[in-house]
Amino acid sequence: MRIPDAFFWLWILGASTVVATDLPPYQPGEKLTYHFYWGIFMVGRGTFEVGKGQKDGNYVFSFHGKSNNFISSIYPVDDALTSVFDINQRRSINFIQDRKEGDHHVWEETFFFYQLRMGSTESYISGEKKWFNIPAEGVQDKLSTIYYMRCLDWTTRDDASTLLGNDKENFDVKITRLKTERVELDDFVPIPTFQVEPNTEYLSGFVKKGKMLVWVSDDRFKIPVRVVSKLSFGTVSAVLVKVEGVKDWPYDPKD
């Protein structure tokens, strides 16, 4: 049982194969900070940032999540993910993950070669390299999926899907839009949201049998503000606590 998997998969929430909106709702400089909870106990902190490649203009997404002292004494976690995203084609080009979770360590890099319709993943620990098939139109990685989902116009759809490129198997990620709801968080004024639920059948282990709900800000930013996953060992959740680099974000409390 790997608790950090549940925290990370809270973010792999869905996208669509349909045409995305012309302008993304995020820009380089955006930084989102979340607190992670296991039941009522805070167990970690994570940040998602948007940058831009210096030469090619592609967007660079990064995530860093780390457990706090409470959980680190039992199961230390230090995860770093980086995704290079073609902002014009809205597809992943390159993905690096360096995940340290307990005594488990994954450090590998994935490239997507669309002209060849092939992807490759190389482990920097074992040196093993794997090749796998991908469609020419594009796939997403674990991190770019979040940002691709945010590009979609959710005002006229009830569901969406995308393909998650993976050396083991390409996974079809599906997401269903549910109800609208106003969410109250400690660090913001009430935020209007729409709720979505991703399928979990493509996931592994105990997460596969869980149930996930995500609350996304119902505006042009489409920022996930709260995520709850109910699993066999309890409930894990993520809560937005800070937004930086987002012009005209309207939900910060007034002084």
Image (cartoon, rainbow, N blue to C red):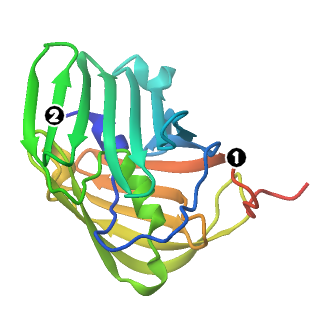
Percent x, y for residue 1?
Answer: 19, 34
Q: Nearer the viewer, mark 1 or mark 2?
A: 2
Q: Please give left or right for residue 183 compared with residue 203 in the image.
A: right
The image shows residue 64 at horizontal and vertical percentages of 47, 31
* Residue that carries the numbered disc 1 in the rendered image: 245
Q: Quadrant of the C terminus?
A: bottom right
Horizontal side, residue 253 vs residue 242: left or right: right
Please name whichever residue, 159 or 138, is drawn nearer the observer in this view of the structure. 138
**Residue drawn at the location 38% of the way across and 57% of the way down:** 90
Question: Which residue position is annotated with label 2?
Answer: 120
- Where residue 130 sits, quadrant-wise, is top left
Q: SS class of the residue under badge 1? A: loop
The image shows residue 223, relative to residue 49, as above or below, that is below
Amino acid type, mark 2: Ser
Relative depth, front residue between 20 and 114? 114
Q: Quadrant of residue 31?
A: top right
